Image (cartoon, helix red, strand yellow):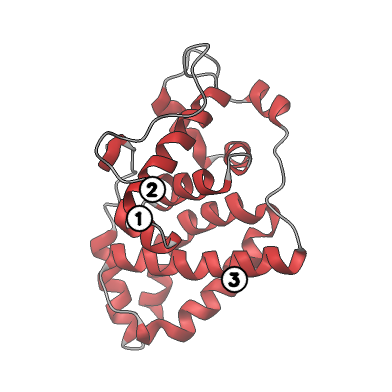
Amino acid sequence: MGQGGVPRRPQPRDGELGAAVARAQEGDETAFAVAYRIVQPGLLGYLRGLVGDEAEDVASDAWLEIARDLGRFRGDGAGFRGWTATIARHRALDHLRRQRSRPRPARLEQDALELPGRHSTPDQALESLSTERALELVRALPRDQAEAVLLRVVVGLDGPAAARVLGKRPGAVRTAAHRGLRRLARRLGTTADGAADADPPTPGEPT
């Protein structure tokens, strides 16, 4: 479990990622390809939660900028995840402004029929975030909750790193992620009937 009780997928390859980035900054194209393969799945999942079917195009734009500005990056593997997520988010917001749109609502009724049933565990609900239809459900969350969930669970950032991407305080991001996961669990039928939609902030944490 991460800070504030929010699950975060472990990132066992961050050491490998940091080494690959360092070599890529010295001009090693193979190392850059390694970094891309490690980061791209989570980054693409994050972008799908923001822009839907346009995610691959936005990711391509983001990677062009990442490659161009790679020499400016300073940090380790975990820091690289956060840096690339920040760039991808800016490109996604630019795309949404150009399209004059917001994330499209999910087809909740159909998704609910296909996703795990009421007896599934919260862990199974979180694992299903890797599926396209679950990302559609995430996109139906309030924007702050959706982004917090995507950055914490899909990209794998910790609270402070996700907060830097979003330009918010860590406590606010942890609270948003917690509330978003609770709402998502209800959509997946994994919580008890009658639970309230809004959860109180973690005691002692800023919001």
Q: Position of residue 22 (x, y in %)?
A: 28, 79
Please report contact status of discs 2 and 1: CB closer than 8 Å, yes or no. yes
Q: Amino acid at mark 1?
A: Arg
Q: Amino acid at mark 2?
A: Ala
Q: Residues within 10 Å of mark 1 (few under 14, many from 20)?
A: some
Whichever of labels 1 and 3 marks the residue nearer the N terminus, that label is: 3
The image quadrant that residue 56 belongs to is bottom right
The label on residue 60 is 3
Residue carrying label 1: 169
Q: Nearer the viewer, residue 135 or 180?
A: 180
Q: Position of residue 48 (x, y in %)?
A: 60, 52
Residue 85 visible in rendering: yes
Q: Position of residue 92 (x, y in %)?
A: 60, 64
The label on residue 172 is 2
Looking at the rendered image, the disc whose residue lies closer to the viewer, 2 or 3, is 2
The image quadrant that residue 31 belongs to is bottom left
Residue at x 36% of width, y 85% of height: 72
Residue 2 visible in rendering: no
Q: Amino acid at mark 3?
A: Ser
Image check: 101 left or right of 82? right
**Gap in angstroms between the C-alphas marked 2 and 3:** 30 Å
Task: Label 1: state its secondary structure.
Answer: loop
Image check: 93 left or right of 66? right
Image quadrant holding the C terminus, namely: top left
Q: Nearer the viewer, residue 13 or 163?
A: 163
Residue at x 50% of width, y 34% of height: 128
**Gap in angstroms between the C-alphas marked 1 and 3:** 29 Å
Whichever of labels 2 and 3 marks the residue nearer the N terminus, that label is: 3
Residue at x 42% of width, y 41% of height: 177
Above or below, 60 against 50 in this view is below
Q: Nearer the viewer, residue 100 or 47?
A: 100
